[in-house]
C-alpha cells in the first residue's frame, strides 16, 4: 500500500461520506478524499472543478514507475466533458480509475467507459462495499466487524427503504454526520464502524433527534400549496431549509392525492422532490427542470435562481426550469 497513491472524489452527503469511510477502511493511510457537490462546472467545490484541478497532477506519475495512482469517484459522476478527460488519462495508463454511481440519470454516461460502474439497487456506500468485498476485484475481504451493517444502514436511509430495519440507524448516522462534521465523522467511523452505538453517542443522538423533530414540526405547521404540473400530476409545495426527506414523507402520508412534493430551500436555492416508492419519477422531473438536476425515482432535486416558492410552482406547472 505504501507505493499506491489513492485519490477519492465523493459526494458530501451521508452516502458519499459513507463511501469515504468504506474506502478508508480498505486503503487506510494512503487515501486522500475530496468531498464535492453537484454544481455548475467551474464552480468551486463542484466535482468537475475539483477533478479538473486533480488530473494534471496525475501525469507526473509516469516519471516514477513504482508509483501507482488510483482514482475513485463514488456516488457522484462528473460531466461527459470531464469523463472524457479522465478517460484520456486512463488510456495512457497513468491512473487506474473506478467510478461507482447508482443515480439512474448517469447510467448511459457510465456505460461508455470501461471504468464506469452503475447499479440501481444499492447506494454508493453499499456499492463500494460490495466492490471491495468481492474476491474477483483483488481486494481482501472486509473482515472488520460491522462494515456490512454500516453499509446497509446508509443504503436504507439514502434510498429511503422504509421497511428496512437498518433505516433508523441510517437516519441516526446522518444526524451525527452533520453534528460532527465530515472529517471527524470519517475519522471516527473508519476507526470504529459501530461508533454510533457507543454509550456517549446515545445521549447526543437523543438530543439531536429531539431538536430535529421540533424543526420538522415547525416546518410542517407552515401552509402547504397544492397545484398540478405540466403533465397534470398533483403536487404540494412547502418551504423548509432542512429535513427534506422526513418532511416529504410526512406530507405524502398526510395528503394521499399528492403524487409528489417539492421542498423549497430558499437559503441554498435548491428544490428537493420526494414521491412514493414505485410512484411518480421525480428524478426525470428534476433533470427536466435543470441540467444538473436528477437523483432517484422517489428522491431527487435541482437548483434554481428564482427567489420565491411561487416562481418554483410556476416552473413546475409549465415544466421548464430556470435555465430556459
Image (cartoon, rainbow, N blue to C red):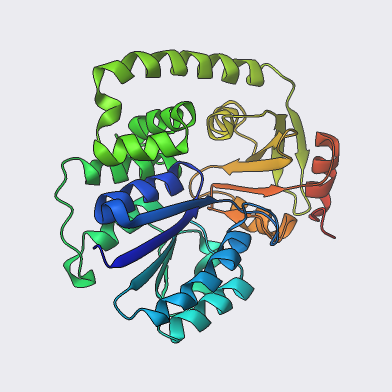
Q: Which residue is drawn at 56% across and 29% down?
A: 243
Q: Quick one: quadrant of the C terminus?
A: bottom right
Q: Which residue lies furthest to the front in this view?
A: 63
Quadrant (top left, top right, bottom left, bottom right) of the N terminus: bottom left
Q: Nearer the viewer, residue 306 or 81?
A: 81
Q: Residue 148's spot in the image, x, y percent?
A: 23, 46
| Residue 208 appears in the rendering | yes
Q: Residue furthest bottom?
A: 92
- The x, y position of residue 246, in whole percent, is 53, 30
**290 in relation to 237, above or below:** below
Q: Is residue 164 visible?
A: no
Q: Which of 127 and 319 is in front in this view?
A: 127
Task: Note whether 39 is above or below 111 in the view shown.
Answer: above
Camera-side residue of 187 and 313? 187
Residue 101 figure quarter: bottom left
Q: Where in the figure is residue 150, as x and y percent of width and height?
A: 28, 41
Q: Residue at x 80, y 41 (%)?
A: 313
Residue 134 placement, left or right of 315: left
Tell me if 153 is positioned left or right of 36 in this view.
left
The mark total stands at 0
Q: In which quarter of the image is residue 308?
A: top right
Please report the residue visible at 25 percent of the width from the left and 55 percent of the height from the top: 26
Q: Is residue 24 left or right of residue 162?
A: left
Residue 181 vs 199, above or below: the answer is below
Amino acid at each position: 500500500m505504501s507505493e499506491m497513491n489513492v485519490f477519492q472524489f465523493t459526494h458530501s452527503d451521508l452516502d458519499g461520506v459513507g463511501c469515504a469511510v468504506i474506502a478508508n477502511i480498505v486503503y487506510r493511510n494512503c487515501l486522500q478524499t475530496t468531498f464535492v457537490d453537484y454544481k455548475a462546472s467551474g464552480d468551486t467545490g463542484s466535482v468537475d472543478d475539483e477533478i479538473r484541478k486533480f488530473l494534471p497532477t496525475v501525469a507526473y506519475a509516469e516519471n516514477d514507475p513504482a508509483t501507482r495512482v488510483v482514482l475513485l469517484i463514488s456516488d457522484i459522476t462528473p460531466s461527459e466533458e470531464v469523463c472524457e478527460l479522465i478517460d484520456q488519462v486512463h488510456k495512457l495508463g497513468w491512473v487506474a480509475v473506478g467510478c461507482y454511481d447508482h443515480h439512474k440519470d448517469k447510467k448511459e454516461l457510465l456505460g461508455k467507459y470501461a471504468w464506469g460502474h452503475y447499479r440501481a439497487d444499492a447506494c454508493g456506500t453499499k456499492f463500494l462495499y460490495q466492490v471491495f468485498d468481492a474476491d474477483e476485484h483483488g481486494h481482501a475481504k472486509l473482515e472488520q466487524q460491522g462494515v456490512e451493517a454500516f453499509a446497509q444502514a446508509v443504503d436504507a436511509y439514502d434510498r429511503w427503504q422504509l421497511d428496512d430495519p437498518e433505516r433508523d440507524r441510517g437516519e441516526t448516522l446522518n444526524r451525527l454526520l452533520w453534528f460532527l462534521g465530515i472529517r471527524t465523522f470519517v475519522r471516527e467511523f473508519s476507526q470504529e464502524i459501530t461508533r454510533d452505538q457507543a454509550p456517549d453517542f446515545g445521549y447526543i443522538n437523543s438530543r439531536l433527534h429531539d431538536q430535529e423533530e421540533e424543526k420538522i414540526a415547525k416546518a410542517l405547521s407552515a401552509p402547504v400549496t397544492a397545484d398540478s404540473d405540466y403533465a397534470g400530476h398533483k403536487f404540494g409545495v412547502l418551504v423548509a431549509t432542512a429535513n427534506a426527506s422526513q418532511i416529504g414523507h410526512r406530507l405524502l402520508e398526510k395528503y394521499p392525492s399528492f403524487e409528489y412534493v417539492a421542498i423549497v430551500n430558499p437559503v441554498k436555492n435548491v428544490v428537493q422532490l420526494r414521491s412514493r416508492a414505485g410512484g411518480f419519477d421525480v428524478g426525470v422531473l428534476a433533470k427536466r427542470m435543470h441540467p444538473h438536476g436528477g437523483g432517484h425515482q422517489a428522491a431527487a432535486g435541482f437548483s434554481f435562481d428564482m427567489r420565491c416558492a411561487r416562481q418554483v410552482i410556476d416552473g413546475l406547472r409549465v415544466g421548464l426550469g430556470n435555465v430556459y
